[in-house]
Amino acid sequence: MFTGIVEELGKVRSIKHGVEGMRIEIEAHQVLLDARLGSSIAVNGCCLTVVDLGDGWWAADAVSETLARTCLSDLAEGDPVNLERPMRIEDRLGGHLVQGHVDGTGEIVSSERLADSAMAVRIAASSKILRYMVEKGSITVDGVSLTVASEGEDGFSVAIVPHTAAVTTLGLKGPGARVNLEVDLLAKYVEKLLGAKVTS
């Protein structure tokens, strides 16, 4: 479980494609302080398992299922990535409850700088994602916990404060870029429970 508060901006060191997926090596420091083989680290919102690590880098395998549901396959050597370790019981929950299980991808339609240096970003998404959206609700975009500013039939908008733009990939991505999306876990449970009630 994660919070959507990015700890570090890492960099893709190398990518090796295989028959069943790809291995990605990432340069990092903060997230490696207590990492070991088998540890979980979220990469752009996708929970991956540490399968190898060294001084200033670590590696994970992304299988075909992961690549089909996320935009990790868009990554190239040198690209920045948002990194976060799983939350600990004693940690403050600064964002919201994030599983690191990406529900789908969206595409940035527009990104506008506002007078206060914040960014207004519009993201196109499928109805499968948008059905869980609610104004002022939570959404995870590339692993970043954000608040839905508005939602419509074909997408939604978020406001990104200057600090978040400076320390995550969201300040670097523009129109046409794909992003990983994870909807609020609570919304999915509510839907499941209400569906069961209606059919029973």
Image: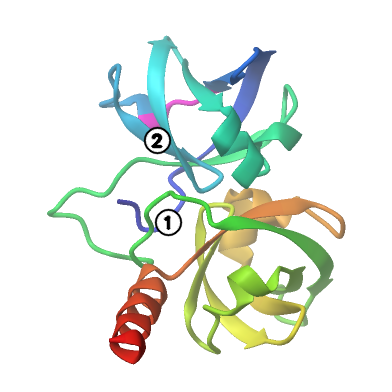
Q: Amino acid at mark 2?
A: Ile
Q: Position of residue 72 (x, y in %)?
A: 65, 37
Q: Earlier in the sequence, mark 2 or mark 1?
A: 1
Q: Which residues are magenta?
A: 27-31
User: Is 63 situated left or right of 186 in this image?
Assistant: right
User: Is 30 situated left or right of 145 in this image?
Assistant: left
Task: Read off the residue under disc 1.
Answer: 5
Which of the pair 54/40 is nearer the observer?
40
Q: Position of residue 57 (x, y in %)?
A: 48, 16
Which of the pair 55/40 is nearer the observer?
40
Q: Is residue 105 magenta?
A: no
**Vertical comparison of 122 with 150: above or below:** above
Question: Which residue is painted at 57% across and 60% down in the image?
Answer: 164
Question: Which residue is painted at 28% across and 19% down in the image?
Answer: 36
**Vertical comparison of 153 with 33: above or below:** below
Question: Visible in this render: residue 10?
Answer: no
Task: Read off the residue under disc 2.
Answer: 41
Q: How many marks?
A: 2
Q: Position of residue 109 (x, y in %)?
A: 84, 67
Question: Which residue is painted at 75% across and 36% down in the image?
Answer: 74
